[in-house]
Image: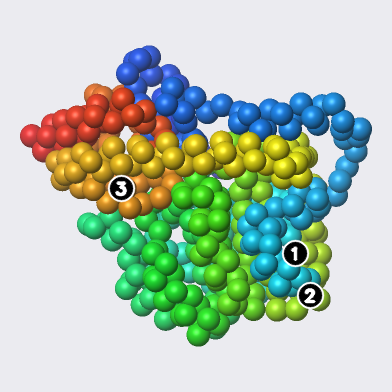
Amino acid sequence: MPLDSLTQQPPDGLLALMSQYAADPRRTKLDLGVGVYRTEAGATPVMAAVKLAEQRLVDIQGSKSYLGPEGDVEFVRALQPVVFGAALTAELGGRLTGLQTVGGTGALRLAADLIAAASPGHRLWLGTPSWPNHAPVFAGGGLHVRPYRQFDAATQRFDLEATLVALNQAATGDVVLLHGCCHNPTGADPTAAQWDQIIEVVVQRGLVPLIDIAYQGLGQDLESDAWALRRIVARVPQALVAYSCDKNFGLYRERVGALFVVAARAAGAEAALSHLAAHARASYSMPADHGAAVVRTILADATLRAQWSDELRGMAARIASIRNGLSALGQVGLVDLTPLSQQRGLFALLPLAPNVIERLRVEHGVYMAGNGRINIAGLAQSAVARFGDALAAAQTAAAA
Ligand code: LMR
């Protein structure tokens, strides 16, 4: 095997930014890079409900023996009503199945493997801009990725027209990736009326939605953030849902997620699950247990669950208040921050040239993704004005 013939791969842009930020000695630096929740003090603490659940596990867990490629089945079962709601979960019955995955990314990759097993080289429509890892994950799973524009950078809003034009070109059975809530990287979700128009096209053309939902509870609240997902799933015979607990349980490095399959019939769901288990077994055998056990413990206990949803509500409220603070800055140079209060979740995508993004980092210690994405939660209330000043200064300097 000629390893010497391999060429060096560039590091992942977002992950490289984390080490650049860590190496920067400036005390005034701002980390608006990777998508993690931060407190006003800039910390990403372990949630109190998680700490309590971990303590309980230490006390009562009797074995660490293998669970199997499907992971923690009770975790998957407990998560279903959180994601789909109790009524839809009951209505779907045996048509709904799922398994624990290695974070949301693992769920997306298993979804790609499943689709490719049913139809090699199958077409997946991906609205852009999207999370930069979407296309590599789907292509790595053997899908044919078909990008289309879904965001209007000038107005900072979801582009319904471009989306409908693209989806109307899709063929029956094509898969379409949809962000369930808190769009990454734009923060610009469709409105309820826009979702209904998208769903109509998905239903009319017989498309298969693959819904990526990684921020439930960090936009508005657990129920509102799942509204679109539930509305879609209720209308289609088949759907896939890639779920991440990394952000809403703050379990990032524990890599906790799930892939749910909704099939036209219970027998199809069972067959799909057997394929997913086989793919998991052939790639990593089975997922790590700890994070899923924590989530299951929280969801099974009324007190822990209430504490978790209170904490999550507090996180969403802090993100919303930073959004309002940024929005109140209005027009800053060429960037209109006003729409940020209408967007949801951790991210906004600012229309900034690469030299402005570089000046922000080098001259002002403001770290953001190379595409202009900022993590709203990386800002403290007290840093909003400073960020606005840096944004204005970097644009002025770049234009000089
Ligand atoms: C992000 O978009 O920053 C997060 O989802 C982290 C990642 O893995 O990219």
Closest to the observer, 228 or 317:
317
Mark 3 or 1, closer to the camera: 3
Secondary structure state at the residue bearing disc 1: strand
The residue singled out by tag 3 in the image is 340
> Can residue 338 be spotted in the picture?
yes
Q: Is residue 266 above or below residue 380?
A: below
Residue at mark 3: C-beta within 8 A of ligand 1: no
Q: Amino acid at mark 1?
A: Thr
Label 3, residues with CA under 10 Å away: few <14, some 14-19, many ≥20: many
Relative to residue 364, is residue 200 depicted above or below?
below
Q: Is residue 35 above or below residue 134?
A: above
- Residue in the picture at 46% in, 28% down: 39
Q: Secondary structure at mark 2?
A: helix
Circle 3: residue type = Leu
Q: In this rendering, does residue 255 appear at all? A: no
Query: Viewed as shown, does residue 286 lie left or right of 191?
Result: right
Dot 1 alpha-carbon crowd within 10 angstroms: few under 14, some 14 to 19, many 20 or more: many
| Image quarter hosting the C terminus | top left
Give, as a three-letter code, the residue at label 2: Ala
Q: Quadrant of residue 332?
A: top left
Q: CA distance from mark 1 to mark 2?
A: 9 Å
**Colour style of the rendered protein structure:** rainbow
User: Which residue lies under the disc numbered 2?
Assistant: 266
What residue is drawn where x is 13% and y is 31%? 397
Residue 33 x, y percent position in the rendering? 41, 35
Residue denoted by label 1:
97
- Relative to 83, say whether 394 is above or below: above
- Left-right relation of 51 to 399: right
The quarter of the rendered structure image containing the N terminus is: top right
Say which residue appears at 37% left-offset and 28% top-offset.
380
Q: Secondary structure at mark 3?
A: helix
